[in-house]
Image (tube, rainbow, N blue to C red):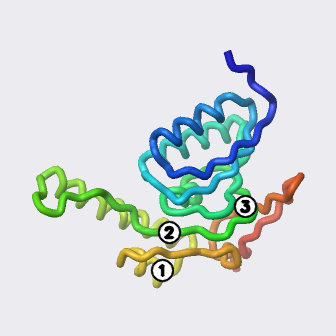
Amino acid sequence: MITKQLEHTIIFTDDIEEGTVQDLIDKINQYAFVNLYFSTFGGYQDIMAILIDFLNHRFDNGSLKLTLFDFVASAGTDLLLDYEGPIYVKNLRALLFHAPDISANKIRKSKFQKNVEEQLFQDNEIYYKRLSALGLSKAEISKIKDGDDIYIFKDDLHRIKRDLYVAEETTTSHYVITKPNK
């Protein structure tokens, strides 16, 4: 039997895959409250959606503080779109956005493959609208549609239309680094 401690810090720097996310969920579940420091190069969007559901549940229970650090890319940036709690940043160098994709059969396409590709196209159109609402420009979204990566560096985090809070060494300052709406 695992004894739950009052508070614990967990650092996640892995790719978003079934095994790494399940390990993270299992680790978080060992503690009554977790300070989660999160950095990733990305991974599977469907697995990220499962992690976000779990993190939202922990936030709803008042048992999680999420801090993005270093570099958050690809599926990891879905936290900015779907995580319902406050997001803190500490030494966050950059965010990387790009269009979700699938592994496609290039030679012999089945009906299933064609339907999956059409669904991906539709889902991506919704994703682009959500990125626009998050603060990415039309030019950036156009580049993403063309298959490019878009970086939002530390000095440009104010462009993100979501409150991000600065995490200090021992305490958290509750001030927003986004620019106020005019």
The residue that appears at 62% across and 64% down in the rendered structure is: 71
Give whichever of 153, 126 is nearer the camera: 153
Image coordinates for residue 168, horizontal then vertical, percent? 85, 59
Give whichever of 130, 96 is nearer the camera: 96
Give whichever of 107, 109 is nearer the camera: 107
Mark 2, residue position: 97
Q: Amino acid at mark 3?
A: Val
Q: Amino acid at mark 2?
A: Phe
Q: In the image, which disc is placed on residue 89? A: 3
Which element type, helix, strand or loop, lies under badge 3?
strand
Q: Quick one: label 3, few (<14), some, or many (20+) residues within 10 Å?
A: many
Residue 62 visible in the displayed image: no
Q: Amino acid at mark 1?
A: Glu
Up-down relation of residue 100 to residue 140 (above or below): above
Q: Would you say the residues marked 3 and 2 are in contact, meaning their CB atoms lie under 8 Å apart?
A: no
The residue that appears at 69% across and 60% down in the rendered structure is: 69
Mark 1, residue position: 140
Image coordinates for residue 76, horizontal then vertical, percent? 54, 56
Which element type, helix, strand or loop, lies under badge 1?
helix
